[in-house]
Amino acid sequence: MSDVIEMADGRRVGLAKFGAVDGYPVLALHGAPASRIMFDVTDGPAKKLGLTLYCPDRPGYGLTPKDDTPTLSARVDDLELIADALSLEKFAVLGVSGGGPYAVALAAKLGNRITGLGLVSPLGPVAEYEAAKKSGLIGDEHKKMSRGHRILFLDLPKLHGVLSVQAGLSARVFKAAPHLFARLFALSLSASDRKVLEQPHVQESLIAMTLEALRQDVAGGLADLAVFSKPWQVAFEAITAPAFVWQGTSDRIVPESVSVWLSGLIPNCRLVGLEDCGHFWVYDNVEEVLGALAGISTSASANAGVVD
C-alpha cells in the first residue's frame, strides 16, 4: 500500500507499507536506483512474522521531491523525522544495497531507539575504505576495490555533467524497453544472480521498482551517488542495536571487500558470508532476512524492558 506522508516541517514523502497491519515496525530503506515498492516481495513473509515494513522513497525517487544538496547526515535527519511522523518509538532498520549507508548512519544517530539493524548486500563506506587502503591502514586480508567500482562510486560522481548524460541515456533506454534492458543487465552479473533474475516475479519486481524510481528521471540516482562518493563520518561505536550483514561472494554490484569491512566497524554485528551468491540473493531468502531481524529486534526490546 502506497501513500504520501507529511513530516513535521511540511515536506511530503512517498511511503509504502507491507506486512502485518499492526506488527513490529521496520523502517526499510531501498537500494539505488530503486523505490519504496522494492519491498513488495516482503509482504507475505512479513505478515507471517508479524512485522510491518515502512518503506519511504528517498528524495528524487518515486513520490518524494528531490533535495538540492544531498548529504548523508541531512538525509538521516529526514529519516528521523519520518519515523517521528509514523510514531515509531522503537523500531528495526533494514537497509538493502544503496540503502545500507542510510541505515547504518540512522542506527548510529538514534542509538537505543533502534532495536535491530539488517544490511543486505550493503554499499559500504567506499571513500574511507579507499583512503585506508592507500595509507596502509587496511591489510591484505581486504582486497582493493575493482577499477569499475572505483570509477562508479568515486570518480564519476565528480563528473556531474558526464554522469548526468550517461544516466539519462540509460534511463531512456530502460523506459523504452525495460524487459530487454533487464535481460542485458543480467548478462553483466554473476551466474548466481542471473539465475535469480530469470524468475519472472523477480524480473517484474525489479522493473516495477525501477520505473517508479525514474518517475523524476535520474535525480534520485545522481543524488545517491553524490552521497556515496563522500566519507560517511559516522560514529560506528554509537550503534547499540544488534546487527546482521548478509554479503555474497559473487556480488558484482557493490564491492564485497568494503561490505565485509563495514561489518567489522559495527559493534555486535554478525557477518553472514554467502558463498557463490550474488547481489540479488535476498529475493530467494526474504524470510531468512526478516526472521533474523525480527529475532534480534524483539530480543533487544525485551532486554530493554527488563533494564527499564
Image (spheres, grey):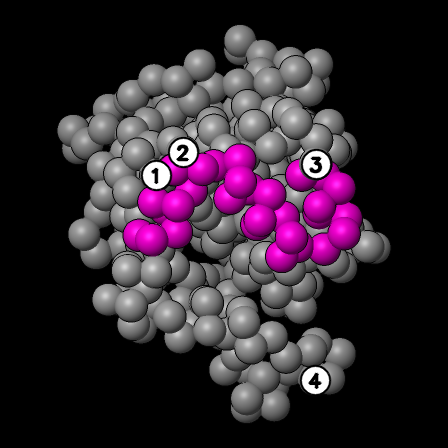
Identity of the amino acid at label 1?
Leu
At x 61% / y 90%, what residue is drawn?
136
Q: Which residue is mark 2?
A: 211
Q: Are marks 2 and 1 in contact (CB under 8 Å)?
A: yes
Residue 96 showing in the rendered view: no
Q: Earlier in the sequence, mark 1 or mark 4?
A: 4
Structural crowding at the residue carrying mark 4, measured as other residues with C-alpha within 10 Å and reported as few (<14), some (14–19) or many (≥20) = few
Q: Residue furthest right?
A: 275
Q: Earlier in the sequence, mark 2 or mark 4?
A: 4
The span from disc 2 to disc 3 (Cα, nearest Å) is 19 Å
Q: Which residues are magenta?
A: 168-197
The span from disc 1 to disc 4 (Cα, nearest Å) is 40 Å
Asked which secondary structure carries label 3, the reply is loop
| Prevalent SS, magenta region | helix
Query: Is 184 one of the magenta-colored residues?
Result: yes
Q: Are marks 3 and 1 in contact (CB under 8 Å)?
A: no
- Mark seen at residue 139: 4
Identity of the amino acid at label 4?
Gly
- Mark seen at residue 198: 3
Asked which secondary structure carries label 2, the reply is helix
The span from disc 2 to disc 4 (Cα, nearest Å) is 41 Å
Identity of the amino acid at label 2?
Leu
* Left or right of 291, for residue 167: left
Query: Is 24 one of the magenta-colored residues?
Result: no
Structural crowding at the residue carrying mark 3, measured as other residues with C-alpha within 10 Å and reported as few (<14), some (14–19) or many (≥20) = few
The span from disc 3 to disc 4 (Cα, nearest Å) is 38 Å
Q: Which residue is mark 1?
A: 214
Asked which secondary structure carries label 4, the reply is loop
Vertical comparison of 196 with 170: above or below? above
At x 70% / y 31%, what residue is drawn?
199
Q: Are marks 1 and 4 in contact (CB under 8 Å)?
A: no
Quadrant containing the C terminus is top right
